[in-house]
Amino acid sequence: MSHVIVIGAGQAGAALVAKLRALGHEGPITLIGAEAHPPYQRPPLSKAYLLGEMEAERLWLRSADFYADNNITLRLGQPVAAIDRAAKTVTLGDKVLSYSDLVLTTGSSPRTLPGAIGGDLDGVYTVRSLADVDAMRAEFIPGARVVIVGGGYIGLEAAAVARKMGLEVTVLEMAPRILQRVAAPETSDFFRALHSDHGVTILEETGLDRLLGAGRVTGARLKDGRELPADFVIAGVGIVPGVALAEAAGLEIENGIKTDAHGRTSDPHIWSAGDCASFPYRGGRLRLESVGNAIDQAELVAENIMGAGKDYEAKPWFWSDQYECKLQIAGLNTGYDNIITRGPEGPAVSFWYFKGDTLLAVDAMNDPRGYMVGKRLIESGKSPSKAAVADPATVLKDLLKA
């Protein structure tokens, strides 16, 4: 009977095994995770969980009974040592498991600060796993000084939580502006002002020379020679896709584990989905780091294991919560040449990315209507006029009728 093994017990892995059973797969299913916890949500880790507003059990994606009730074998705290493609087996510890289909949902891991600049000191953290957040929680004491390296969304979310808890926060960004890699200057300006209003010090075009301390971090020396005191440091300098197992097994790698439009890797019996996978997109290849992509892509792979033969059509969307601001992003802004601003209307404002006359993406701050309309327009391939978007008299939902 067909045995599906899924390596990686995160959002994608959990979605995939649940979908397989829902579609009527009758053979055994095994979900393997390196962490000891059952599959859990990551977005609340750096927000509600760190703030103490959510218990660990509320992070679980499924109840403890779900996997047993659906005859899904969980092997947690058991990292896979190797994949033998010829034998169609995986090795974990002293066990060897045979598969009919193997799925790699190995996610991603945070980049760390090099040991050469002090990244190996105590008191230096990343924000990715439950263990990461548990390790740093005791540091969040009112009045403590934290230096956050990296002005992307992870760094800014951590800054917002730290300020809410009464810490002194400094964000270092090497690029000319925060969020430069992922957002327009208008969005950067919005969040710079938001954090400044909450008392965060943001230092842009500011490189880190090294961390200071003997055994434990006590400060940060900047490239310009300044020194900042620090009781602890958070590194928010990006993530890397989890490709080590795939690479060791000889699978093709291209900005992640290379898949075709169905989610199949260069081995016909091995599939991949989520943060670790790159897939065909508009004549190129794309790898998305988002909850929505992890779920959608994983469920499509489950359908294709069952013989559906469907292509993956990505519908990118993202979000970030900082203070009382909810940012929702629809689409991908790559290649934009014009930004149209709608608002502000009270606390709501949105930035609409165009390439020529084509709408690419929308950044909506406290503007759920703008987000939903923009998302529907992008997914349907429609582009409103720039003048209509900018005109405060335009009823947004009317743009869908054009």
Image (tube, helix red, strand yellow):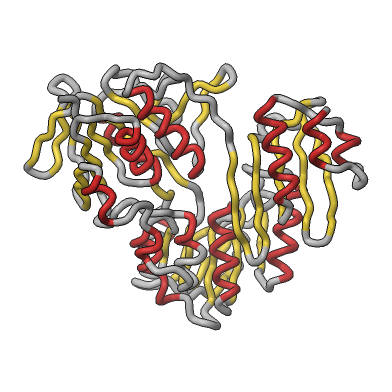
In the displayed structure, 98 sits above or below 327; it is: above
**Residue 67 location, x and y as percent?**
25, 47
In the rendered image, the quadrant that contains the C terminus is top right
Left or right of 375 in this view: 63: left
**Residue 129 location, x and y as percent?**
38, 56
Extreme bottom residue here?
A: 143
- Residue at point 57%, 70% (across, down): 227
The quadrant in which residue 149 appears is: bottom right
Q: Is residue 243 visible?
A: no
In the rendered image, the quadrant that contains the N terminus is top left
Of residue 53 and residue 207, the one placed in the foreground of this image is: 53
- Residue at point 65%, 44% (across, down): 329
Left or right of 1 in this view: 216: right
Q: Is residue 344 visible?
A: yes
Of residue 62 and residue 268, the one placed in the foreground of this image is: 62
In the displayed structure, 23 sits above or below 116; it is: above
Of residue 60 and residue 141, the one placed in the foreground of this image is: 60
Left or right of 5 in this view: 313: right
**Residue 12 location, x and y as percent?**
39, 40
Extreme left residue here?
A: 94
The quadrant in which residue 284 appears is: top right
**Residue 159 location, x and y as percent?**
58, 65
- Residue at point 70%, 58% (across, down): 191
- Residue at point 40%, 63% (across, down): 58
Left or right of 214 in this view: 234: right
In the displayed structure, 208 sits above or below 232; it is: above
Q: How many numbered markers are drawn?
A: 0
